[in-house]
Amino acid sequence: MSNSKELTAAQKMIGDFAPKVVELTDDVLFGDVWERKELAPRDRSLITVANLITSGNTEQLGFHLNKAKENGISEQELIEVITHLAFYAGWPKAMSAIMVAKELFSKEK
């Protein structure tokens, strides 16, 4: 598991319940895959957000919208991604995603 002093999001959420999942999340997914230089973090965020929207997996979307903002994607760009995907992924998936984004972005203002 990650050796940082501050607990990761995965450690906080499920560390006691599923330590192996936390280890894979922290060390492999975010410690290796997200750090690979072949794609910029901004690109990885766009890909991840788009995939979560098109697959209807809004449970993880809030975290990844925040990560996308950390990686340089503006709120307007993220709203545009959702709008664009409405025509490819389906209106219900886009509406679910836009509600997550609206709640998240309005909390930050």
Image (spheres, grey):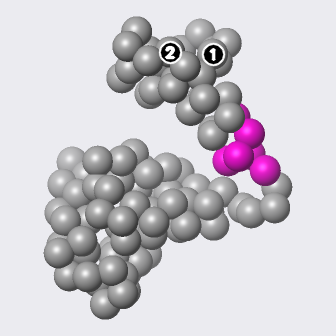
Residue drawn at the location 67% of the way across and 12% of the way down: 3
Pointers 1 and 2 in contact (CB under 8 A)? yes
Q: Assess disc 2: are there few (<14), some (14-19) or many (≥20) residues with their C-alpha within 10 Å of its C-alpha.
A: some
Report the magenta residues as a range.
31-36
| Residue for point 29% across, 47% down | 59
Q: Which mark is residue 1?
A: 1
| x, y percent for residue 24 | 60, 29
Image spot of residue 76 (x, y percent): 37, 74
In three-dimensional space, the C-alpha distance between marks 1 and 2, rounded to whole angstroms, equals 8 Å
Which callout, 1 or 2, points at the residue further toward the start of the chain? 1
Amino acid of disc 2: Pro
Question: What is the residue that sits farthest to the bottom in this orientation?
Answer: 87
**Label 1 sits on what residue type?**
Met
Magenta-drawn stretch contains 32 = yes
Disc marking residue 19: 2
Q: Quadrant of the N terminus?
A: top right
Residue 99: name its quadrant. bottom left
Q: Is residue 40 visible?
A: yes
Q: Which mark is residue 23?
A: none
| View extreme (right): residue | 37
Badge nearest the viewer, 1 or 2: 2
Residue placed most toward the observer, 103 or 24: 24
- Does dot 2 land on a helix, a strand or a loop? helix
Q: Secondary structure at mark 1?
A: loop
